[in-house]
Image (cartoon, rainbow, N blue to C red):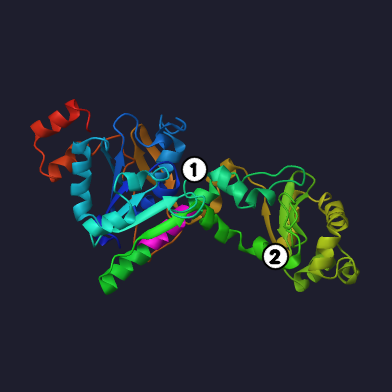
Amino acid sequence: MASQTALPLAGITVVSIEQAVAAPFATRQLADLGARVIKVERPDAGDFARRYDETVHGESSYFVWLNRSKESLTLDLKSDEGRGILEKLLSTADVFVQNLAPGAAARMNLDAQSLQQRYPTLIPCDVSGYGNTGPWSGRKAYDMLVQGESGLMSLTGPDECPSKAGVSIADIAAGMYAYSGILSALYMRATTGTARAVEVALFEALGEWMGSPAYYTEYGGRQPSRVGAEHATIAPYGPFPTADGTVLLSIQNDREWSAFCAEVLGDASIATDPRFCRNSSRVEHRDECNAMISERTRLLSTDDALALLDKVSIANGRLGTVSDFLSHPSLAGRDRWREVQTPGGPARALLPPANLSGVEPRFDPVPALGAHTDAILGELGYTDAAISELRTAETV
């Protein structure tokens, strides 16, 4: 593994008061690239995502995913001593990330404007549900709620049952935009000397992902239908039964449709049938189209169906499980798995998706609560006796 000094963000220090998913996802990606991330946690329990479950050697699956390569510092930020320690950290930090409850950062004098007055070179990043201003700024927002408010749940699931996505996509979207925003701000500071604040709202992050259905609804007069695993505006696109399971396939253009009709359905004339000759026609007659395809695929094993679709260059796949994903040949064949230590033992972890030539991302341990408190306080000049006093006072 490459040393930390070889990583792109080596030398960058991030201080984060973070919980759950969105902010920790942003800072973990900064840590992957070499940034020093000091995670400030409450002494009594820490990030509440630590207690979501106990499935990874006694640790939470969410926490293990989101918090490798970070340093955990416990601080009581309601105490004067705790705030003093935080201020010392911020005075030399490059980035400050927080996703506190609405209004909490401002009450603690940790809002972007106040921070930049005290520390002009610091890049503050606020992650919130609906933004720091506006009529919804005071509302709490969790992933499911944002999926509902954004309209995403009205598009997801079978026709009779609106559903949320199976992963925390509002949080993940916000974390990705916070990460890219911080990188942009670091670049701007390096090139202009000006530190800009970054603000990301979960609702607006997921709103960006709603672009296609939003345009379709505004200019088409109705929103896309909820069609489960199929595509609201493309057909055929989705799962089809085989003799022993299910195959996924997608037709993207008329050339593919013609080849599919001739080679898979065995009847080239279907491609010119007015009900099926254009994608919009196939969407309108989706049930008939799907029934015709299913009649053919049911005669084939899954392996034979996939082989036939490959032969005519039709995009296809299997309906896999999470266990299938974990053993997927693409991940093993591309050497995507690494090992990361957790407080309870080693765990597998995937490489980040963005591959930088010659750079091996960092995979330092997932920290136990407060694991780095003494070391960080020592760096700040606290003696062993002073640290002991802070512990006695439950400041750390």
Q: Decide: is 293 above or below 55.
A: below
Q: Which residue is mark 1?
A: 140
Asked whether 102 or 86 is in front, the reply is 102
- Position of the C terminus, as image quadrant, is top left
The x and y percentages for residue 347 are 40, 39
Query: Marks 1 and 2, how far apart in space?
Result: 28 Å
Which secondary structure lies at badge 1?
loop
Q: Residues within 10 Å of mark 1 (few under 14, many from 20)?
A: some
Quickly name the residue at label 2: 218
Location of residue 158 in the rendering, given as x and y in whole percent from the top left corner: 74, 46
Label 2 secondary element: helix
Would residue 377 be found to the left or right of residue 254 on screen?
A: left
The residue segment tinted magenta is 174-182
At horizontal 24% and vertical 62% (from top left) the residue drawn is 121
Residue 295: image tag = none
Residue 31 position in % (x across, y down)? 33, 52
User: Label 1 amino acid?
Assistant: Lys
Q: Which kind of residue does numbered mark 2 sit on? A: Glu
Query: Residue 256: which quarter of the image?
Result: bottom right
Of 212 and 393, which appears nearest the observer? 393
Q: Is residue 2 visible?
A: no
- Assess whether residue 395 is covered by the magenta stretch: no
Residue that appears at 52% across and 43% down: 142
Question: Is 175 covered by the magenta stretch?
Answer: yes
